[in-house]
Amino acid sequence: MKLLLLMPTLLAFGFTLTGCQTSTTPKNHPPVGSDFLLQVYSTGQIPGIYPGLTTKLSISVLAAKDYVGPVQLTALDLPQGVTAQPKTVELTGNGSSVITTLTLNADDNSPIAGKTFSVIAKNKTSEVIDKVDIIVYPKSVQVPGTRAFIELDSKSVDPKNNLWLGGSTGFLKITPNLDIDIVSSTPPDCGTVMVGQDGGIWARAIPYMRLDPTKKQIERYPSPRGGSGCASHPVDAKGHVWDNLYGLYQLDLLNQKTKIVPGTENLGGTVVIQDGYAWFSARDELYVVDVDSLATRQYTVPGVSFFSGSFVSNGKVYFVNEQHLSLFNPESETINQINSGKWRISKLYGLDKYGNAWVSGNDSTDKFHPALLRIDSRGKVLKELPDFSGTFSATADGGLWYATHEYEDPRVAYIAP
């Protein structure tokens, strides 16, 4: 099958956001004429703060010229809703130093932002400034009983935009308002869950474990192929499980029957259920399978590996290829690259029902300017936010779920369109 590459010329817009920590003060000696040296310590990551919470900056103040006396610490030009608690430290001369912290507070309504602000140390005769970057994360909620790192994907969100998680406390439903409902206190096997297209919430495990969220009842089924362990096999609208180990199999759990999709024998790959089809990718082959009849269309797309961060929407496969958001159209057998202007796309987190995508991108004109972007099908930026470290899942209405990678404090947040 012939493959064409189309590259429409489209334009995207964005704003500048600093992406690294810098300082106006030398690190080995104070500015000429100053009584002291100021340094804000960085762990290599941009400091962050959540609305309604606090964070602490580690600060060192070093005396110069045998200065003895107080030094006032404060911060200016902080993001909206963020304030600093001023502090005074005492230096005792002879190169003495003080290591302390400066506490920042974010109110409940602090908007998402990335900004460079100033930490200031001063006395009556000297003032030293260190520039620091900070990110204000979206408003979040701590998730009880979850694993240390919360992994989100396209199967984490139900049609009503609720997020489903599993853990030692059971099956958890979290609404976009961040209300948590423990729908079942039975912990899911393997600790994580996914949303099936049949309306059930499934543990990502074999034997299969299904929660009926309305009746709040648990059902268990062995696999007709046998085996056990953790797995993330998608479930179609009729409750069939699609197993992609050594071929693509449709599993009827109620009747314990198995069907293999012809032509996929012994293949390993990834599978997505969408629009009444199973989209199965193996090597550079794409199989589009009718979930009822198992009728199959096969496409060869050299050099493109689908479903490693790919999504299906309106009969097309969206993925990142050569730092562009791209789509494969099975009808025309073409790949279109969406030109997002200065943005070089690194990750795709999903699409909404309108064809808009959430992605991570880097500004080609400023290497210190990564961003989390919502872009439309022509590449225009609809929303730009500072990029976060974590995992994401887009919703049908254009929102985005975010999960932190904090070991001690796992949190989730919902970002409205």
Image: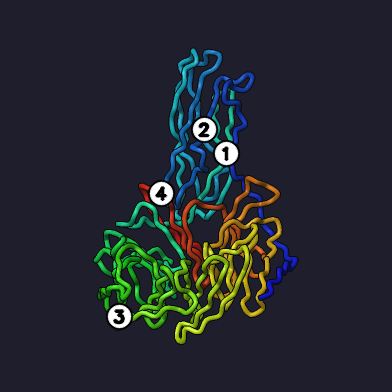
Instruction: Give the mark toward the camera: 1 or 4.
Output: 4
Q: Amino acid at mark 4?
A: Glu
Real-space Cα distance between discs 2 and 1?
Answer: 10 Å
Tag 1 secondary structure = loop
Instruction: Give the mark toward the camera: 1 or 3.
Output: 3
> Can you identify the residue that label 3 sits on?
256
Q: Amino acid at mark 3?
A: Gln
Instruction: Give the mark toward the camera: 3 or 4.
Output: 3
Instruction: Give the mark toward the camera: 2 or 1.
Output: 1
- Mark number displayed over residue 406: 4
> Can you identify the residue that label 1 sits on?
21
Residue 83: x and y, percent? 49, 44
**Residue at 45% of width from left, 64% of height from top?**
153
Instruction: Give the mark toward the camera: 4 or 2.
Output: 4
The reply, left or right, for residue 331 in relation to residue 89 is right
367 vs 411, nearest the viewer: 367
> Can you identify the residue that label 2 sits on?
40
Residue contact between numbered discs 4 and 2, judged by CB atoms under 8 Å: no
Task: Bin the neighbour count of mark 2 within 10 Å (Cα to Cα): few under 14, some 14-19, many 20 and up.
Answer: many
Against 292, is 355 above or below?
above
Real-space Cα distance between discs 4 and 2?
Answer: 22 Å
Against 141, is 77 above or below?
above
The reply, left or right, for residue 188 in relation to residue 351 is left
Residue contact between numbered discs 2 and 1, judged by CB atoms under 8 Å: yes
Real-space Cα distance between discs 1 and 4?
Answer: 21 Å
Residue 207, quarter of the rendered image: bottom left
Residue 196, quarter of the rendered image: bottom left
Residue contact between numbered discs 3 and 4, judged by CB atoms under 8 Å: no
> Mark 1 vs mark 4: which is more N-terminal?
1
> Mark 3 vs mark 2: which is more N-terminal?
2
Residue 287: x and y, percent? 53, 75
